[in-house]
Image (cartoon, rainbow, N blue to C red):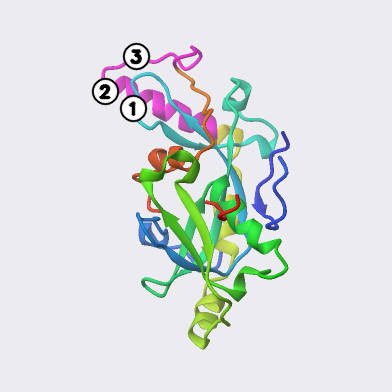
Amino acid sequence: MAIKNGEVNWTDVSGGEKKSGGGKDTFMRLMPGSNIVRVVTLPFQYNQHRYSPDGGKKYGYRVNCSMANGSCPLCEKGDKPKRRWYLGVIDRKTNMYKILDIGYGVFKGISSYVKDESWGDTNRYDVDLLTDPNNGPMAYYTVVCKPPKPLSAGDLQIKAENDVEDLARRAQAPTPEKVAEKLRAIQEEIAASGHQSNDDSPSGLETAVSSTEEDDDNFFKDYDKTKKASF
């Protein structure tokens, strides 16, 4: 699989900073129920592993893939990264600019509208990301577009004040050395807790096999942070 990072088109689903970005409040967490946003950027793709060594955290560790920079310690161990995307959005609950971190299900749901001539570019309409944990993994998120409505003067100002350089920076792949450094830090953390872990053993390195949005939400549940009806 070709590893790709950075700004991509909504139709690009192949395998293949001026602002500080703020703190945790910069990210938008999708809550149960309605989450209405206006997507004001193209998606920025990055690739991430779920690293689950023995004795580690329940939902594992977020480790960005470095393969785009030539090699990746986790890829070399047989762990396949999952594609994710950063979006710049206006959160309609707060009318503030936020960064939304999405998985494949939400990406495909929005993409289906972008490719539909009746809807087109995301600047033309709000998107409601409906979240229902009771629906099960295949319908955890549902993407529903609102009737087309031009960006207001306030929306245009918010969009202009939040350029895409921060998203591009966040989507950059780390170096292999940075990944190796993070893995060592994780092992040291586990050792300090009294657990022993062999990250070369099958139980020490678990490949994430589920691509459901529910799986992603559980994994990223402490991270500040579908589909069309026919999907």
Q: Is residue 36 left or right of residue 16?
A: left
Which element type, helix, strand or loop, lies under badge 3? loop
Q: According to the image, label 1 marks what residue?
A: 189
Q: Which comes sooner in the sequence, label 1 or label 3?
A: 1
Q: Which quarter of the rendering shows the N terminus?
A: top right
Q: According to the image, label 2 marks what residue?
A: 193
Mark linked to residue 126: none
Boundaries of the magenta span: 179-203
Amino acid type assigned to the residue bearing label 3 in the image: Gln
Q: Write the residue at 64% across / 57% down.
A: 111
Sort mark 3 into few (<14), some (14-19) or many (20+) by Cα contacts within 10 Å. some
Q: According to the image, label 3 marks what residue?
A: 196
Q: Write the residue at 57% across / 55% down.
A: 228
Q: Is residue 19 above or below residue 100?
A: below
Circles 1 and 2, Cβ within 8 Å, touching? The answer is yes
Between 28 and 20, the residue placed more toward the observer is: 28
Q: Residue furthest left?
A: 194
Question: Which x, y percent locates residue 142?
Answer: 49, 54
Q: Write the residue at 35% across / 54% down.
A: 32
Amino acid type assigned to the residue bearing label 2 in the image: Ser
